[in-house]
Image (cartoon, rainbow, N blue to C red):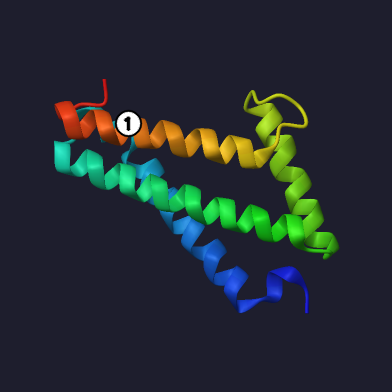
Amino acid sequence: MSFFESDVVRAEMTEISELQEEIYSNVFKFPTMSREDKLEHINILERLLDKQKVLYTRLSLSDDPEAKEMKKRISESAVVMGLPENVDMNVFFRDMSEMVKKMKEQIDKTGSDL
């Protein structure tokens, strides 16, 4: 069975897609959201990052050629978005999680992400 035929992987990818859609649909509303809505948005972002990290780890551990190709495309996309070549994606996920944590703390403290 190929990597992408796994029910677990398919379910995770579906959930990642749904979370991404939810994040994207509200990203421009974020500055005008209530404190509670901002925190919910951040919680969704945290879930998305966690799911992406798990999927990336699964891709990294797989010998499936399609999984290796997807991992390669993710790395290439990261470079296009401005990350240095050969960046350790685990470091990227750690840094993103830390940034989201700081945003959440700021909103908790002040009601704003600024």
Q: Is residue 73 left or right of residue 83?
A: right
Q: How many marks?
A: 1
Q: Is residue 69 left or right of residue 107?
A: right
- Quadrant of the image occupied by residue 93: top right
The picture places residue 101, in percent across and down from the top left corner, at 36, 37
Q: Nearer the viewer, residue 26 or 65?
A: 65
The picture places residue 71, in percent across and down from the top left corner, at 74, 49
The picture places residue 77, in percent across and down from the top left corner, at 68, 36
- Helix, strand, or loop for circle 1? helix
Residue beneath the point at 44% across and 58% down? 18
Residue beneath the point at 74% across and 36% down? 76
- Quadrant of the image occupied by residue 103: top left
Identified by mark 1, the residue type is Met
Q: Is residue 26 left or right of residue 95?
A: left
- Quadrant of the image occupied by residue 30: top left
Q: Identify residue for label 1.
A: 103
Image height of 45 relative to 7, above or below: above
Q: Nearer the viewer, residue 45 or 110?
A: 110
Q: The N terminus lies in which quarter of the figure?
A: bottom right
Residue beneath the point at 85% across and 61% down? 65
The picture places residue 84, in percent across and down from the top left corner, at 71, 24
